[in-house]
């Protein structure tokens, strides 16, 4: 057989965070989460299946990857090959389009794009909800990148129903700004950080209880298009996730001194009357939910305060597409 497909997927930022797995092998989460897909950051990946290939190969950002990185991809492709009943080797070529120095993890867009290309190349043609259960097993956050706008990842009860659901296309003047604080590779991966938190944090049970309530409230806010409520829940949920890490043994944090300065600045900008709310993932960089129509003005205020740090605006992104 010989088949080639290419797909594009955008990254997403969680407003209700996924933090912790209840099954490390199947990537089943401890809680449901909800995100916004971003237009500015995406991956494009092509998959070529051919009987003439002896083994899988993987090229990322023009660099051939070593056997360890390629093995991770092969393992993921096997999920599709098993269902399709084939053993054909693949050539994977992927490019991440993340503005230089944005310091944003690209695993969500990377696995969503790879999964969508493989889905088509194998002829499986799973629908998007089912595809999300496959890409989940590359990276949890990838589950949500199959759709655009506001997307919920329902924790589900089994592997088959732990999937993405489209909530709203977010076409009501929504934007996000990223302030890159430090773009070096982090020392503790999200995988290890969440494992340590689940296993040791005194605050983890409270997180689970609170995240479930936040999810209900944020869906209400989205339904009513209540931006203030949306922002307040986003900010509070993100901070609670970071709080769980301080309760772990040993305690840890992804924050840096400059992170705190950025958060302080955002509160000041908000006091000046701009609607803007921060959130952070497993790293020191800050993302700000705002009205897209306000984004340039807020970007200016941030750039003036932090002239050495990239401040990048994104509008709402769409779901995976074959290209
Ligand atoms: O799936 P991962 O390994 O990219 O973990 C994502 C964890 C957070 O970014 C902190 C939260 C989230 O829901 O995206």
Image: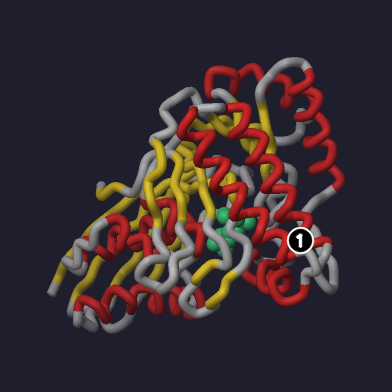
Neighbourhood count class around disc 1 (C-alpha, 10 Å): few under 14, some 14–19, many 20 upward: many
Total label count? 1
In percent of width and height, residue 259 lies at 79, 43
Question: Where 170 sits versus 200, above or below?
Answer: above
Q: Residue at x 64, y 40 (%)?
A: 233
Asked where in the image residue 252 lies, by quadrant, the reply is: bottom right
Horizontal side, residue 84 vs residue 19: left or right = left
In percent of width and height, residue 54 lies at 27, 83
Q: Residue at x 56, y 41 (%)?
A: 218
In percent of width and height, residue 299 lies at 66, 24
Q: Look at the image and tell me whether residue 61 can be seen.
A: no
Q: Residue at x 79, y 29 (%)?
A: 267
Horizontal side, residue 177 vs residue 252: left or right = left
Residue sitting at the far left:
1
Horizontal side, residue 72 vs residue 5: left or right = right
Q: Look at the image and tell me whether residue 188 can be seen.
A: yes
Question: Where 303 sits versus 223, above or below?
Answer: above
Q: Residue at x 40, y 73 (%)?
A: 159
In percent of width and height, residue 244 lies at 76, 61
- Callout 1: helix, strand or loop? helix
Please state the quadrant of the image where ligand 1 appears. Answer: bottom right
Report the colour scheme. Answer: secondary structure
Report the front residue among 215 and 323. Answer: 215
| In the image, the residue with mark 1 has its CB under 8 Å from the nearest atom of ligand 1 | no
Asked where in the image residue 246 lies, by quadrant, the reply is: bottom right
The quarter of the picture where the N terminus appears is bottom left
Q: Where is mark 1, residue-wise?
A: 244
């Amino acid at each position: 057989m010989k088949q080639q497909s290419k797909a594009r997927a955008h990254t997403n930022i969680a407003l209700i965070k996924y933090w912790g797995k209840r099954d490390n092998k199947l990537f089943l989460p401890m809680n449901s989460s909800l995100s916004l897909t971003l237009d500015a950051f995406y991956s494009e990946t092509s998959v070529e299946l051919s009987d003439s290939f002896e083994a899988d190969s993987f090229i990322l950002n023009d660099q051939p990857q070593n056997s360890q990185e390629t093995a991770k991809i092969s393992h993921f492709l096997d999920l599709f090959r098993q269902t399709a009943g084939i053993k054909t080797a693949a050539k994977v070529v992927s490019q991440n389009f993340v503005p230089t120095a944005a310091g944003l993890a690209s695993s969500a867009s990377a696995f969503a794009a790879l999964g969508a290309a493989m889905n088509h190349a194998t002829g499986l043609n799973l629908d998007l909800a089912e595809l999300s259960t496959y890409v989940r097993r590359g990276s949890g956050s990838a589950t949500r990148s199959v759709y655009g706008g506001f997307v919920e990842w329902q924790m589900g009860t089994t592997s088959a129903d732990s999937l993405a659901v489209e909530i709203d296309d977010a076409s009501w003047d929504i934007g996000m700004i990223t302030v890159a604080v430090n773009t070096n590779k982090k020392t503790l991966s999200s995988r290890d950080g969440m494992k340590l938190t689940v296993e040791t944090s005194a605050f983890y049970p409270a997180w689970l209880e609170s995240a479930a309530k936040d999810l209900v409230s944020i869906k209400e806010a989205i339904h009513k298009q209540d931006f203030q409520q949306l922002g307040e829940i986003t900010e509070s949920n993100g901070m609670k996730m970071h709080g769980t890490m301080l309760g772990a043994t040993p305690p840890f944090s992804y924050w840096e001194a400059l992170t705190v300065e950025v958060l302080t600045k955002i509160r000041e900008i908000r006091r000046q009357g701009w609607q803007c709310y921060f959130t952070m993932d497993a790293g020191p960089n800050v993302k700000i939910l705002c009205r897209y129509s306000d984004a340039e003005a807020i970007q200016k205020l941030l750039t003036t305060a932090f002239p050495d740090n990239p401040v990048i605006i994104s509008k709402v992104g769409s779901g995976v597409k074959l290209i």
